[in-house]
Image (cartoon, helix red, strand yellow):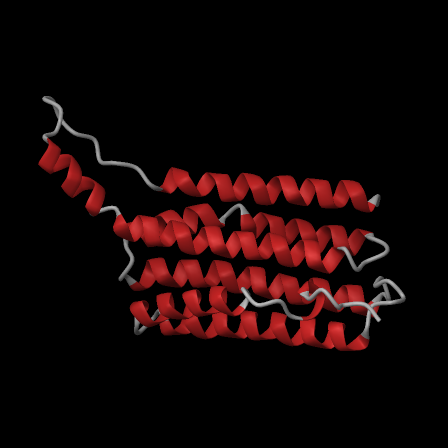
Amino acid sequence: MNKGRFEAFSDSVFAFAITLLILGIALPAFKNPPPSERELAHALLRLWPNLLAYLLSFSVIGIMWQNHHALFRLVDTVDRMTVFLNLSLLGVTVFIPFATSVLGAYPTMRSSTFLYGLTLTSSGSIYNLLLWHVKRTGAFHANVSEAAIRQTTIAYRVGAMTYAVATLASLVAPVLSFALYLLVAGYYLFPRGADADLATK
C-alpha cells in the first residue's frame, strides 16, 4: 500500500477521534425558566470529572498519534498485515471518546475505570503487535539503529503493561487506576526510541 495514503488515513482518524472527545462534556438540561447564575456555575463546576477525563484522553490520543508518526517515518513499506493491525488500532482509537464519556460521568466506579483501562490496554497491545510485525518483516529503513528499535520496544511494552496493571487495579481501587493512566501519559511525554531525534545511525 502507498505509505502516504496509509499515513493520511490514519491521521484523519486520529483527528476525528480527538475531536469527538469534547462531545462527552455537556451541561445537564435545565427546565424553564433558564438557570440562575448560581445554578449555572454549580453545573459547570460539577463537570470537573468530565473535564479531567477529557484532558487525559486528549493527551492519550495525541501521544498515540505522535507515536504512530514517529514509528512509520522510519518504515519503508506497508503490507496487508500492517494495514490490518493499523485498522485494529484505529478501531480502538475511535472507541476512546465513548470510554472517556463513561469515565467522566462515573469516575470512581469500577465498571467505568475498567472499561477505560481495557480500551487503553487494547491500544497498547496493538501497538506492540504493529512494532513486532514491522521488525519481523524488516520494514524499517536500513539506517534505523538497533538501539532505537530496542528502546521503542521497551517503551511500548512499559505502556501496555502499565495499562494492564491499571485495568486490574480498577477492579479494587478505581482512583489508583486513574492515577496510573495519568502516569503513562506523563511517561510518553519524553521522547524514546523511534520518537527520539536520533533514531537513525
Whole-percent x, y for residue 120 in the image: 50, 61
Residue 57 in the figure: left or right of residue 86: left
Residue found farthest to the right: 142
Residue found farthest to the top: 33
Residue 12 in the figure: left or right of residue 45: right
- Quadrant position of residue 142: bottom right
Residue drawn at (53%, 52%) of the image: 61
Total numbered labels: 0
Whole-percent x, y for residue 145 in the image: 81, 73
Whole-percent x, y for residue 42 in the image: 14, 42
Residue drawn at (52%, 65%) of the image: 121
Whole-percent x, y for residue 171 in the image: 34, 70
**Residue 130 sits above or below residue 51 on the image:** below
Residue drawn at (11%, 36%) of the image: 39
In the image, 171 versus 63, the foreground residue is 63
- Quadrant position of residue 165: bottom left
**Residue 114 sits above or below residue 100 on the image:** below
Look at the image and tell me in which quarter the N terminus lies.
top right
Residue drawn at (84%, 71%) of the image: 201
In the image, 70 versus 10, the foreground residue is 70
In the image, 116 versus 32, the foreground residue is 32
